[in-house]
Amino acid sequence: MNTDKITICIPAYKCKDYLDECLASIFKQSYQDFRILLCFDFCKESMEYFKKSIYYNNPKICAYITEAKSTPYIIRNTLWQTCSGRVLFFDSDDIMEDNCLETLSQCTADIVYFRYMPFKEQVSECWYSGNYARGAFYTNKKIFDTTGGFREWLCSADGEFLKRVQIHELNIEYNDNFLMYYRNHLTNLSISPETGMKSEFRKQYRDYTRNMVNPDVKIETVTTKIIPV
């Protein structure tokens, strides 16, 4: 078992309807050696909601807000640079299975992808997808140092990042456990009209990733300024 503390990086935007449920699922984990880096994407309404919640001032949570509107991928880059050891990327509207961190703590691959169950309103109404999550994954700081972080795209940057990981021949594990519940709603990057699966943005990004010809070059990692909450 890897004994490093797990750092959970969570970008958050317009999340006040979901954040409590997300954080509750983390604090219910059987594995408790973790800390949370939570960053609000210039969304003061969600930040103020968090400051009134039971999780504000919890010693396991370091909360921030960006100085200006950013993107989830740039926020991930910013939080990732402050980490050491093992890192789990997660979204503020999703929910962890109770054994998520315990299972991941036993994984030693450079990057670990795992399965998820989609749902809309209630976790009890989830359905089988058989897919691996791409936006949520478990990794370590040296991946960042080897490949660079995410591109500052509106969507699909996790797919381009995975291709760089594959070309660098890093150790990837596809874990068959269902470790999270993915919430389907209209503001999801994969569902919203601007960034959804059939959007022009996503098509352009996927075409770029498919046709990458010089992926060995470490990209310049874009970050943003964040302020403690």
Image (cartoon, helix red, strand yellow):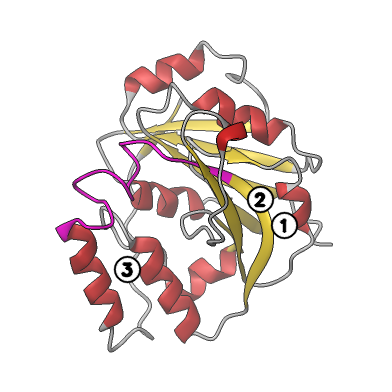
- Between disc 3 and disc 2, the foreground one is 2
Choose between 62 and 188: the one closer to the eye: 188
Q: Report the magenta residues as a range.
A: 181-200
Q: Residue furthest left?
A: 200
Mark 3, other Cα within 10 Å: few <14 / some 14–19 / many ≥20: few
In this figure, what is the number of numbered marks?
A: 3
Residue at left offset 34%, top offset 35% = 41
Q: Going by the image, does 195 lie left or right of 115? A: left
Q: Position of residue 86 (x, y in %)?
A: 66, 58
Q: Amino acid at mark 2?
A: Leu
166 is within the stretch colored magenta: no
Residue at left offset 68%, top offset 27% = 59
- Kindly indicate the quadrant of the structure image that contains residue 28: top right
Looking at the rendered structure, the secondary structure element under dot 2 is: strand
Q: Going by the image, does 166 lie left or right of 220? A: right
Residue underneath mark 2:
179
Residue underneath mark 3:
220
Q: Amino acid at mark 3?
A: Glu
Marks 2 and 1, how far apart at CA: 9 Å
- Badge 3 or badge 1: first in the primary sequence: 1
Residues under numbered marks 2 and 1 in contact, where contact means CB atoms less than 8 Å apart: yes
Residue underneath mark 1:
104
Residue at left offset 24%, top offset 61% = 202
Q: Position of residue 164 (x, y in %)?
A: 42, 78
Q: Amino acid at mark 1?
A: Leu
Marks 3 and 2, how far apart at CA: 32 Å
